[in-house]
Image (cartoon, rainbow, N blue to C red):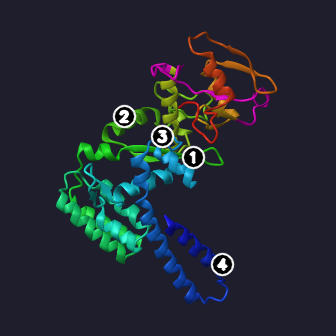
């Protein structure tokens, strides 16, 4: 496309211009015009995404998935690449099997984005609205809602659009009734990246069945005095003594956290999860002898999670231990273990040595 070269030249010319002499009013006008240009370019760029995802496999393009391909080539995070593909599925023109060009799933929203009247925040709100809209809502009603939301987005800021979308949802589904299909579509749990302190944010939506299971577990293990890490021997069975419950200073959220940890540890220890990639489902952790002897530092799990040595030592009290020894060049010399079980020794060595995929620019952890 020769127009891309023209566009790049125009951007170079704009960047070369001095902005020092602009007044506040003039600078604001330029910012507004730039915002419209960026939105229009973004909308047109979405039309290129189906060309990538629909005409070639990820492997042909040098990736493991189309999101991986876009992430590598556009220098995006995997999450941003997936959102880009999702936006294209809703806002880019489609092509029928007969070759006929079809309108986007959200045609009015797509047109507003092409004009530069709305931005990414507006799109997120409208897509979120349709993600929550019950499947029983008929097509004419959906089309009318999409048209009205696009008009609102072009007139109002995202905050006002969100309020309008919530009111529209209340009108379309006043009783808050959702089918099993609606709940199945929205269910999910997301775990964020570890922060500098090792903590990970968790968010999501549980379906009623999963909530019922969790309520049952928490009613037992999250009761005051249960699974308290401040006790010398945390109680995981039976009823806590009254004095144990009284000295429990944890919040309800902290008790839920500790109950979930105890439940997961018990599930892993039961051995009922079978095997995964040739190894029993367990926590695989690698560290150095120096760190282990000092009790300080950070170990790395098979999923790439950073685990403080204090937590590792506590975890090791419930584990079967393996010892892998490497020479100064990282070559494995010895593998020992405290219990004889039928599992491939090579996998243990690779977990300890490489901690995951060794392909350049690949960050897939060893568990996967």
Residue at image position (38%, 74%) is 115
**Cα distance in 3D space between marks 2 and 4:** 62 Å
Q: Residue 20: x and y, percent?
A: 67, 85
Q: Which residue is disc 2 drawn over?
A: 213
Name the image quarter holding residue 142.
bottom left
Crowd rating for badge 2 (residues with CA inside 10 Å; few <14, some 14–19, many 20+): few
Q: Is residue 134 above or below residue 248?
A: below
The residue beneath circle 1 is 193
Query: SS for tag 4?
Result: helix
Q: Mark 4 points at which residue?
A: 16
> Furthest residue to the top?
340
Q: How far apart are marks 4 and 1 (CA)?
A: 39 Å
Left or right: residue 158 compared with residue 276: left
Q: How far is the residue under mark 1 from the one under mark 3? A: 21 Å
Q: Is residue 179 above or below residue 285?
A: below
**Location of residue 214 (image quadrant):** top left
Residue depicted at x 27% and y 58%: 102
Mark 1 touches mark 3? (CB < 8 Å):
no
Distance CA(mark 2)–CA(mark 1): 26 Å
Q: Mark 1 or mark 3, which is nearer to you?
A: 1
Q: Whole-Å distance between the Cαs marked 4 and 3?
A: 57 Å
* Tag 3 residue: 256
Disc 2 on helix, strand or loop?
helix
Tag of residue 29: none
Which label's residue is closer to the chain start, 3 or 2? Answer: 2
């Amino acid at each position: 496309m020769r127009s891309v070269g023209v566009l790049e030249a125009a951007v170079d010319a704009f960047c070369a211009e001095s902005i020092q002499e602009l007044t506040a009013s003039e600078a604001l006008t330029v910012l507004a015009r730039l915002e419209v240009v960026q939105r229009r370019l973004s909308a047109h760029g979405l039309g290129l995404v189906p060309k990538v995802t629909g005409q070639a496999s990820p492997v042909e393009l040098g990736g493991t998935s189309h999101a991986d391909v876009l992430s590598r080539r556009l220098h995006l995070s995997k999450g941003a690449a997936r959102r880009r593909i999702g936006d294209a599925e809703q806002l880019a023109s489609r092509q029928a099997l007969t070759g006929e060009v079809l309108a986007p799933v959200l045609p009015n929203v797509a047109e507003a984005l092409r004009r530069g009247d709305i931005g990414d925040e507006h799109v997120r709100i409208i897509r979120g609205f349709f993600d929550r809209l019950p499947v029983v809502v008929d097509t004419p009603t959906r089309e009318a809602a999409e048209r009205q939301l696009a008009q609102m987005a072009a007139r109002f800021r995202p905050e006002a659009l969100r309020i309008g979308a919530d009111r529209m949802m209340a009108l379309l589904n006043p009783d808050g009734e959702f089918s099993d299909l609606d709940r199945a579509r929205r269910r999910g749990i997301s775990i964020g990246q570890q922060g500098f302190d090792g903590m990970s944010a968790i968010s999501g939506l549980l379906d009623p069945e999963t909530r019922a299971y969790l309520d049952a577990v928490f009613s037992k293990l999250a009761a005051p005095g249960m699974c308290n890490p401040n006790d010398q021997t945390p109680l995981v069975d039976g009823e806590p003594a009254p004095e144990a419950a009284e000295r429990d200073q944890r919040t309800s959220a902290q008790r839920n956290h500790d109950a979930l940890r105890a439940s997961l540890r018990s599930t892993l220890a039961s051995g009922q999860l079978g095997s995964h990639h040739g190894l029993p489902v367990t926590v695989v952790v690698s560290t150095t002898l120096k760190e282990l002897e000092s009790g300080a530092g950070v170990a790395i799990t098979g999923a790439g999670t950073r685990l403080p040595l204090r937590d590792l030592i506590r975890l090791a009290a419930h584990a079967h231990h393996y010892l892998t020894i490497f020479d100064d060049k990282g070559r494995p010399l010895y593998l020992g273990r405290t219990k004889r079980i039928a599992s491939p020794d090579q996998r243990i060595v690779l977990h300890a040595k490489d901690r995951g995929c060794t392909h350049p620019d690949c960050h897939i952890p060893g568990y996967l």
